[in-house]
Image: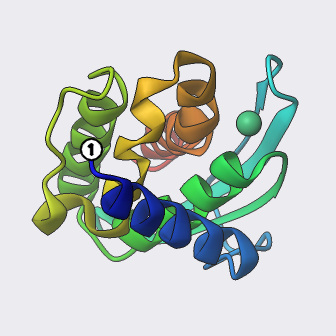
Amino acid sequence: MSAELDSLYQEIILDHYKNPHHKGLRDPYEAEVHHVNPTCGDEVTLRVHVADGVVADVSYDSVGCSISQASASVMTDLVIGKPVAEAMAVHEEFLALMQGKGTVEPDEEVLEDGIAFAGVAKFPARVKCALLSWMAWKDATTRSLEETP
Ligand code: ZN
């Protein structure tokens, strides 16, 4: 990865960290989860509201490093308003990027600002930071679907 691209990615992450999107816990919601990344000390409490098969809202409260916080902001941008199946597909795409050890070329059409985490994928210790809110979202969404048949 070029130094130029690396600094662009860092800028995107810093921007989401400083101005997080959709932050704060909101009603209504069907499921609330609390996930922790003990290796870094990141924590997220996350709520999901699903209506008519669409991710109507994802709200969260989080503490931790810039990567974990920025990732939560990017994740909400990507899943809110999408049908659950489509949002799960984006989740899979992000997971593949993060587990690719820096070898997976990110698809900007699908991941938008999520491509900024391509650089993080090279650092195993930080991958958990980036995935924390995504795993919390999947957990909460699965639970909310069980609540509302
Ligand atoms: Zn972290």
Q: Is residue 91 left or right of residue 29?
A: left
Q: Residue at x 49, y 71 (%)?
A: 12
Residue for badge 1? 1
Q: Nearer the viewer, residue 89 or 38?
A: 38
Image coords of residue 37 (percent x, y): 75, 25
Instruction: State the image quarter where residue 83 is shown.
Output: bottom left
**In the rendered image, the vertical position of residue 110 relative to residue 34, given as above or below:** below
Image coords of residue 47 (percent x, y): 67, 56
Image coords of residue 102 (percent x, y): 29, 28
Q: Residue at x 56, y 54 (%)?
A: 71
* Quadrant location of the N terminus in the rendered image: top left
Image coords of residue 45 (percent x, y): 78, 48
Q: Residue at x 53, y 45 (%)?
A: 137
Q: Is residue 47 visible?
A: yes
Q: Is mark 1 within 8 Å of ligand 1?
A: no
Colour setup of the view: rainbow
Q: Amino acid at mark 1?
A: Met
Q: Residue at x 53, y 17 (%)?
A: 124
